[in-house]
Every structure is written in structure tokens, then in C-alpha cells.
Amino acid sequence: MPTALIVDDNAINAELANVHLRRSGFTTRIVNSGAAALTAMQESTFDLVLLDISMPDMSGIAVCETIRSSAPALPTRIVAYTAHAMRDEHKVLYAAGFHDILIKPVDRRATLAMLERQGMGAQSTHGPPPMSTERATSG
């Protein structure tokens, strides 16, 4: 089963992404800060990281750049997850190491399209989401 790390300081946005990914066959872990994301990445490997751009402790761009500089060959797909990425900002996000961009609030169709673009669309299920979410908070 593919794994996803959801990084968002807004619990509602994180849960919405969580439901879409679990229904697409992912085992998920949710953290609410950039620092917690870096810790999670050291503890586990993930197939996908859905990374909020605007967080209070560390920007998503800084988290992505840190992941990419510490493990440049890491095959994890990192997707920017933001409510405010204008077209001119997309270049900055891709240059930082993101593979894709999802605009909040995400819906199922946008999530499935992103998974297809990233070569992860075959796991999709239509039943209730499996109960396989681990939650962590920054301490």
C-alpha cells in the first residue's frame, strides 16, 4: 500500500486531504509543522508528501528544499498544497523541488488528477477510507 505524509497546520485541510488519499488507497500520516515533517521523513519513507506552503514554523518551500538537499535521490513525490499559488509562483515551487501543485481546497477530482500525473493513480478505491491514519503534532 502506498504511503503519504500530509503536512498542514490546519486540521480541517489536513483531514480533507487525508480522506481523499485514503480513498485512493494510501496509508497516511498527518503532521502539523515543517519541523514535524522533517522528523517524519527521517523516521519513515513515504511515496508522497503533500506539503502546505504556508506554515508558522517553517515554510513548505524551506521544508522541500531541506528534504531535497539532504536526500537528492529520494524518489518521494513532493506536492505543494496551497491556497494562493499564482502562476508566476509555480516556477518558484518547481525550482524548490516540488513535483506538482494542488490548490486548496482540494476535491477528489483534483487529488485523483494529481495522483495520475505522478504515476500513482492505479490504487484508487471507491469504498470507505481505510482506518490507517497516524497523527502527530509538533511538540
Image (spheres, rainbow, N blue to C red):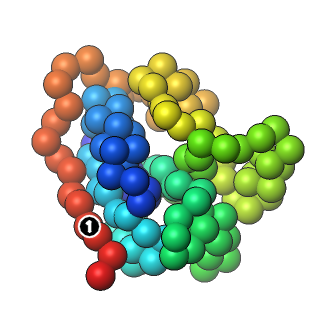
Residue of label 1: 136
> Residue 113 versus residue 9: which sits nearer the camera?
9
Residue at 74% x, 62% y: name it.
Answer: 96
> Residue 6 versus residue 11: which sits nearer the camera?
11
Residue at 40% x, 44% y: name it.
Answer: 13
Relative to 120, say whether 138 is above or below.
below
> Residue 42 versus residue 6: which sits nearer the camera?
6
Residue type highlighted by circle 1: Ala
> Residue 42 versus residue 133: which sits nearer the camera?
133
> For the C terminus, which image quadrant?
bottom left
Question: Is 66 placed left or right of 123 in the picture?
Answer: right
**Splitting the image into 4 quarters, where does residue 41 fall?**
bottom left
Residue 112 in view of the camera? no
Q: Position of residue 26 (x, y in %)?
A: 31, 41
Circle 1 residues within 10 Å: few <14, some 14–19, many ≥20: some
> For the N terminus, which image quadrant?
top left
Residue at 40% x, 53% y: name it.
Answer: 10
Residue 86 in view of the camera? yes
Relative to 128, say whether 59 is above or below.
below
Question: Is 117 placed left or right of 122 in the picture?
Answer: right
In the displayed orientation, state which residue is furthest to the left: 131
* Local SS, label 1: loop
Q: Position of residue 82 (x, y in %)?
A: 59, 46
Question: Is 71 placed left or right of 16 in the picture?
Answer: right
Q: Position of residue 84 (x, y in %)?
A: 67, 44
